[in-house]
Each structure stands twice: as structure tokens, then as C-alpha cells.
Image (tube, rainbow, N blue to C red):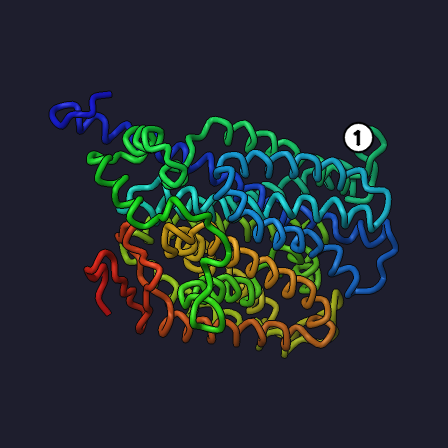
Amino acid sequence: MSDSPGKPAPIADSRLNRRVIGISVGAALGGFLFGFDSSVINGAVDSIRDEFGLDNDTFAGFVVAAALLGCAVGAWFAGGLANKYGRIRVMVIAAILFFISAFGSGFAFGVWDLVAWRIIGGLAIGAASVIAPAYIAEVSPSKFRGRLGSLQQLAIVLGIFAALLSDQLLQQSAGGASEDLWFGQEAWRWMFIVAAVPALIYGFAALKLPESPRYLVGKGRDDEAAKVLREFSGEHDVQHKIDDIKATINTEEQQSLRDLKGSALGLKPIVWTGILLSVFQQFVGINVIFYYSTTLWQSVGFDASDAFLTSTITSVTNIVVTIVAILLVDKIGRRRLLLIGSTGMFISLGLMAVAFSNASGSGDSVSFSGSWDTVAVVGANAFVVFFGATWGPVVWVLLGEMFPNKIRASALAVAAAAQWIANFAITMSFPVFADIGLTFAYGFYAVMALLSLLFVYFRVPETKGMELEAMDSDAKVKRGHFVAETMGEAAGKA
């Protein structure tokens, strides 16, 4: 490839676009593991209850959510590890841990044994959830960063779909999730074991990826960074880009969580914005649909087989709307999509709350009068559409790009850890909320959607088209517009 301007440039641009897509897809495979692990327990939860005698709903919820504790820990430490050892090595470690967890969970001999293996898998998922968006943002041209960053969410929903589909196929092949399938092992155990396949694929893919140019510059490896920027990111003026990166990274100081300290309750305001984005993404209750979807659909009148099918259809819907988001995020912006999503989620969750207020019974024995069961199903799928087209992918895009270079990995780690803790809280609380009443549960999620709307309107920046080097550490947010001071010049206007 020629570095000089001239006739070869257009050909190089076309090739570079394909290559940056390729490495972004490779990094996003961590999201596939995230989605697969999140939903694989969906088809196994009832069998796990029977196998280990889990009669207490709260404890059963803990078993389902145990992996999320590992996710929070993995996310918390991933930023520091990525800064010290590189993005690629952390991806490989995550793949190894997930591979081990798949077999450990599948051959678990007791409930605490299962919890331990799930937490180990969670460490891997948490780390991958931090590294993928950071890496994709760091290798992507600013013009296409939103679309490439959205690949993380597309991988997540594809993982969810793959888990639901494999769960359905395995339980149908065995005649039930608790029935023996192969080698005397029950189908629910094979639901976990098959996760070893995507773990292997992710590990081998990670070994083929180039290291992040911003990590390389931070380590003084400018020649390697220049090669990645030229061959993968499509940069023409490579030296100018490296100089820009150096201006926002103090290579003589070790990056750490101390860099996140600020005047807003001990943290920089932009870090709090990332944390609250993560929390609201979970507090609207999206994972209730995927963790407990089979049980939910059974409660509104579907039998076990139909409930699996309905959950799979919901997952396919999520994939389609995520593709829509990929097409829109760089055109209409991150902030506008979030505002649309919050409004739609508030309305659809409100519909679900009203529908369940017209139902009798509780838990798995809910029955509706009139056509309220249809309203509940429509509301649930509308919620998936609005979330999948907005908050699902856009939050990951923002987390990958909104932080300054100097603190990106560490800030993203804190925000992702907050997301996993929020995920754990919502997953643990749903069985309790359901016992109180599904009207209460979905009413709570609707209120969270309304609060997310207000939060986005007043506090979330628009980062569409901005270079990562413009994300200054002293950035201020005013009515949704990102204002940054970079090298004495305004990078954005309120």
C-alpha cells in the first residue's frame, strides 16, 4: 500500500473501510458472548430450580443473576488491565475464562458450584463488555464510529437469539430441558456447554486483531500505531493523528482510577453521565424480558413450547431494530435516538402495567380478562423495539466514544461495572416485584423510562461526528450539547 497521496488513495479507502469493519466485528464478538450468556439460562432456570430444590424465589433470582456479580468485577478491573497489557490480551483472557465457565456450569454438581462457575463466566463477560466498545471507538473513523460501535449491540442481540434458539432445539431434542440428551447429561446442562463454541471463536478472532492505536501511542509504539491507523482506520495524515492522540494522553503518567476524580460527588461530571446512562439502560427492565421471557409468556397463557418460540421471535425483532439503529445512529445522532427511545419505552411499559392491572393471579398463574393479554404482548414487543433501536446500541456507542483518551478505558470500566450492578439489582428484584404484582414491576420500569427521558434531555452530550481527541477531560454538558475545550479552542458549542 502506498502512503503517498495520489491515484491509489480511493482504492485504499475502499479496502480500509472493509478492514475496519472486519476488526470491529472481531472485537464485537465479545458482545455475542455477553448476549449468549445473558439468555442461555433462560431455558435452564426452571430445570435448575428442580435439580437443586430452589423453592425460594429470591435465592432462585440470585442463581440467575450470579454471573452479573462476576461481570461487575470483570468490568471494574478490565480498564486497568487494558491500559497496562493492551486491549487484545484482555480479550483473549476473557475468551479463556468464558470457555472454562461453559464446561464448569454444564457439569455443576451443586447450586454453589454452579454459582461459582457462572461468576467466572461473568468475569469474562464484564471484561469483554468494556474492551469491545473502547476498542471499536479507538479504531473507527469518526464519520462511521456510531455504526461500527453499534456492532457491539448487534452482537449482543445475536448472542441472545443464538442462546434462545439453542435452548429451544436442545429441550425439544431431549423432550424437555430436564431430560437426558447426550452422554447421560440433561439438556439444560448442554445449554451451558455449547457456549464453549463462541468462546473459542472469540479467542481465535482476538488473536488476529491489531492492537488499538491509542494504546500503542500511550506505550510509545508510534510506528505500530501508524501502521494500524493507515491500514485499518483509513487515516491519510497519520502523523497528525498521532500528534493529536499524544496531546490528549500523558504517556509519562500511569493511567488509573484516580484520573476519574472530579468535583461532582468525587468524580468528573462526564463519568457520572456514563454511569447514569448505564444504570438507566438496565433500570428500564430490558433484561427481565430476556432472563425470564419463557416464564413470562407462560404466565400469559402460552405453553412451554410456544413460550420458547415467542421469546425467540422477540429476539429476532431485537436484531432487526438494532440493524435499523446502525443505519440511523450516524445520521440523526445519539441524543435524538435516546429521546425517542425513552418516550417509546415509557408508553409501552405503561401499557404493560395497565394490562397486568387487569389480570388476576400472580407469578406463573396470571390470567387476563378480555383482550388484555394481547395488550401485554404488544406492549412487551413495542418495548423491545424502542429499546433495541435506541438505548441498546446507543449507550454502548456513547460509552465507547464520550470519554477523553486519557481516561477512556478506566471511565468505561466504571460505567460498565455500574451497568452490571444495576443489571444484577433488576434481575434479583424481578421475582420479588412479580410477587408484589406485575403491575408494580412494569410500573416501576415505566417510571425509570420517564426519568431516563429527563436525564437525556438535560445531561447527555451529542458526540456525532466528533473526533475522540476532542473529548476533553473538562467537558461540560449543557442541555444535551457537548462543550469541550481542547488546546484552547472550543470543540463544540452549547
Which residue: 29% across, 30% down?
A: 16
Q: Which residue is mark 1?
A: 182
Can you give x and y, in whole percent of width and height, for residue 78 in the image? 55, 47
Q: Is residue 369 above or below residue 42?
A: below
Amino acid at circle 1: Trp
Specify the quadrant that holds the N terminus.
top left
The quarter of the picture where residue 370 lies is: bottom right
Would residue 346 be found to the left or right of residue 191 on screen?
left
Residue closest to the far left: 6
Q: Is residue 81 above or below residue 477?
A: above
Specify the quadrant that holds the C terminus.
bottom left
Which residue: 74% across, 41% down?
A: 171
Which residue: 82% across, 44% down?
A: 178
Would residue 183 be found to the left or right of residue 269 on screen?
right
Which of the pair 482/154 is nearer the observer? 482
Which of the pair 28/409 is nearer the observer? 409
The quarter of the picture where residue 463 lies is: bottom left
Can you give x and y, in whole percent of width and height, for residue 396 in the image? 44, 53
Would residue 213 be found to the left or right of residue 100 on screen?
left
Residue closest to the far right: 53
Q: Is residue 297 above or below residue 222?
A: below
Residue closest to the far top: 1
Q: Is residue 385 visible?
A: no
Can you give x and y, in whole percent of width and height, for residue 454 in the image? 41, 75
Which residue: 35% across, 60% down?
A: 473
Helix, strand or loop status at disc 1: strand
Can you give x and y, in whole percent of width and height, for residue 11 in the image? 21, 25
Q: Is residue 257 visible?
A: yes
